[in-house]
Image: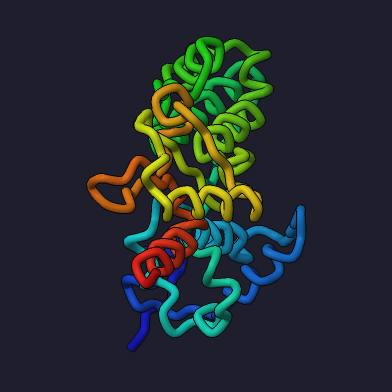
Amino acid sequence: MKIVPTGIENFKELIDKDACYVDKTNLIEKVLKEKVVLYTRPRRFGKTLNMSMLYYFFSNKEKENAYLFDGLNISKNKEALKHQNQYPVIFISLKDMKESKIENQLVKFSYIIARLLDQFEDILDDDIFNEREKKLLKRYHLNTASKNELSESLLTISLCLRKYYHQDCSLNNLKLIYDVRQESLENYEIEQTLLKVCLKEGYAILHDFIESNQYSKYLQYQDLDISSPISFYYHLNSTNKILQNIIQLIEKG
């Protein structure tokens, strides 16, 4: 017999315990269609559980828990599944902020922000952030941020996460990046042809890109062969298939 999940607010705990669950994963479809979603419900109506469900679906920190959605309504939506575990997610709850004085509320909120950054501790010192951003993230993490800094904390963390995961980065818009080595291309007819095709199709040629650009660490690369003066660099989210198609065409030719 399934248990009644009284007091369970964590979606993973509920599914792992095989507790009774009214499938509300269709909410994910609505979230994907809307820019902002506001849900107002009385206490004990499952708001936190629904937010937990959204977190486990979208968070790129929870890929090992993708099984939680097996057999649920959302598993039938192939378009929605393309978004599963693809994004950095900020998930916080303010329901325990019940202090009577604003000073104590600020302390509570400061600890909530610090715990949030525990999830992203491995990126806080990344070189993609400038010194101001690094210092601010560190103060949030160590509970030493000022009142004014705390008021901007969620916005600041959101912008930093977007910067780190390069959701706005031009790399997302590049189909293919390739770097030409210093050797002459005069004796490489295939490569010459390929360069012309790439230029015509709007691909990017970035000389010395790999050594100098801070985003290079997010790229994978593949040589045409051991003697080729061209290396292909591709963004994992979008261009691996394009790269493989080009290499197959060259091999056939």
Q: Is the C terminus in the top left, top right, bottom left or bottom right quadrant? A: bottom left
Q: Residue furthest front?
A: 187
Q: Position of residue 168 (x, y in %)?
A: 64, 40
Q: Is residue 213 left or right of residue 101?
A: left
Q: Viewer-proximal residue, 121 or 14?
A: 121
Q: Viewer-proximal residue, 91 or 228?
A: 228
Q: Position of residue 139 (x, y in %)?
A: 48, 14
* Above or below: residue 85 compared with residue 67: above
Q: Is residue 28 left or right of residue 208?
A: right
Q: Is the N terminus in the top left, top right, bottom left or bottom right quadrant? A: bottom left
- Residue 7 seen by the camera: no
At a point 60% along the width and 21% down the height, the residue shown is 106
* Above or below: residue 142 compared with residue 246: above
Q: Position of residue 252 (x, y in %)?
A: 37, 72
Its colouring scheme is rainbow
Q: Quadrant of residue 132?
A: top right
- Residue 32 seen by the camera: yes
Q: Residue furthest bottom?
A: 1
At a point 55% along the width and 61% down the height, the residue shown is 54
At a point 46% along the width and 68% down the height, the residue shown is 6
Q: Position of residue 142 (x, y in %)?
A: 42, 17
